């Protein structure tokens, strides 16, 4: 059994965990990251190649937070000497009034209006003629926001890994955390390989957060699920798309019938385009990290939708993958972010960020977690995301 001490321990070496560690280390504090697998693995919520960058939300506070996050992305890009956010535009369209996990079209447009963020409201024929979609229902509407785009997932993780190394962060891979025990002097972290001590702990474990929170009596009980997506070939090299989300009613009246996708990734050179059903397939096995094949039914419905509505793509997936995700059990919440509740003795020493569509907020959530761990407060922390 080994023993290791640090000012702060970060549980989870995904994108937000690495961002949290870098933020702490930049302030001259020692940091250890404990990762159950290896940095950059595809078994959790940092899987895949890309995520959508967008400003629009149906709730103004999250749009404001996105606007505040963009300068932090630029700062991260400057520190890493690598572009990570590519502005390709963001297109939202579909059934007005339909609420999904992404929000609602008119409400999101109204938020952009109030914040003075430019966007264009478009009819179905305009969406088809400008962006290459076809045979959309006549009542579909939507908007294009020019500042939206796509985030390079692997580039972000690689950049943060290098910056962590440069600032002295210790990353311990293949070390599974079994217990987090706060006390009056700090926090003890017990793993399969040893015992660690720190003044504070940041839990950035995503879908695995309850492995350490449940024994403390404060499980988050998130909805954990897998999403399957496929990559399609373009018929011509000139064909391209913004990032997009189609707000659609589910055919069977159950679940989410929407679809989303991207243009070709500027950083891969493959020319392939990703599209997916926004179906949320609950994870039922005991270990959510157990590898699973993409859901065949979701791949089939995605290919059919591509065939019917994106004529510039060959409607046969070339490759497919999955991503583990989690959302708060309360659909009215966007995220869990804060220290443990007062019912947990010395819970102020444990910061948790878990659940929600959070990749767009990687540098901001890293900063907030570092603020809470080191200072006990953050100017960017909104009470609506607290763990209460």
Image: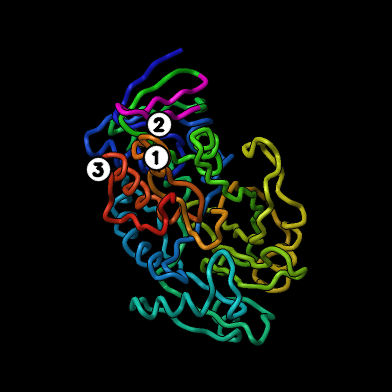
Q: Which residue is mark 1?
A: 18
* Residue 37 image position (x, y, % from top left): 53, 31
Q: Is residue 297 left or right of residue 164?
A: right
Q: Which residues are magenta?
A: 179-192
* Residue 90 image position (x, y, % from top left): 48, 70
Q: Are marks 1 and 2 in contact (CB under 8 Å)?
A: yes
Q: Is residue 167 above or below residue 59?
A: above
Label 2: how many residues lie within 10 Å, few (<14), some (14-19) or many (20+)? many
Residue 298, numbered circle: none
Q: Which residue is mark 2?
A: 33
Q: Name the mark nearer the viewer: 1 or 3.
A: 3
Residue at the far top: name it: 1
Q: Which residue is mark 3?
A: 375
Q: Earlier in the sequence, mark 1 or mark 3?
A: 1
Q: Secondary structure at mark 3?
A: helix
Label 3: how many residues lie within 10 Å, few (<14), some (14-19) or many (20+)? few
* Residue 181 image position (x, y, % from top left): 42, 28
Find out whether residue 186 is within the magenta segment: yes
């Amino acid at each position: 059994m080994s023993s290791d001490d640090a000012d702060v321990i970060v549980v989870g070496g995904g994108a937000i965990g690495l961002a949290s560690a870098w933020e702490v280390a930049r302030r001259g504090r020692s940091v250890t990251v404990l990762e159950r697998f290896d940095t950059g693995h595809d078994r959790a919520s940092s899987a895949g190649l890309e995520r959508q960058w967008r400003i629009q939300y149906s709730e103004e506070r999250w749009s404001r937070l996105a606007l505040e996050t963009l300068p932090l992305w630029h700062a991260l890009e400057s520190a890493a000497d690598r572009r990570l956010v590519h502005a390709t535009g963001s297109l939202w369209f579909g059934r007005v009034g339909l609420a999904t996990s992404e929000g609602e079209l008119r409400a999101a447009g109204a938020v952009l209006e109030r914040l003075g963020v430019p966007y264009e409201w478009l009819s179905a024929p305009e969406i088809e003629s400008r962006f290459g979609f076809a045979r959309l229902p006549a009542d579909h509407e939507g908007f294009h926001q020019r500042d939206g785009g796509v985030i390079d997932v692997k580039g972000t993780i690689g950049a943060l890994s290098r910056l962590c190394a440069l600032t002295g962060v210790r990353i311990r891979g293949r070390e599974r955390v079994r217990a987090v025990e706060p006390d009056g002097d700090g926090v003890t972290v017990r793993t399969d390989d040893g015992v660690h001590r720190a003044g504070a702990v940041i839990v950035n474990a995503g879908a695995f957060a309850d492995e350490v929170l449940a024994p403390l009596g404060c499980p988050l009980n998130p909805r954990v699920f897998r999403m399957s997506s496929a990559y399609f070939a373009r018929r011509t090299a000139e064909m391209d798309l913004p990032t997009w989300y189609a707000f659609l009613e589910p055919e069977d009246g159950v679940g989410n019938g929407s679809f989303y996708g991207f243009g070709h990734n500027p950083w891969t050179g493959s020319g392939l385009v990703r599209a997916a059903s926004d179906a949320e397939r609950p994870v039922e096995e005991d270990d959510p990290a157990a590898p699973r094949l993409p859901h065949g039914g979701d791949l089939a419905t995605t290919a059919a939708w591509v065939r019917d509505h994106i004529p510039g793509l060959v409607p046969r997936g070339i490759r497919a993958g999955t991503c583990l995700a989690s959302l708060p059990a309360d659909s009215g919440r966007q995220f869990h972010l804060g220290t443990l509740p007062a019912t947990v003795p010395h819970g102020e020493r444990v910061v948790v960020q878990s659940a929600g569509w959070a990749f767009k907020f990687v540098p901001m959530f890293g900063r907030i977690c570092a603020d809470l761990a080191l200072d006990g407060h953050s100017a960017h922390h909104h009470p609506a995301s607290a763990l209460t």
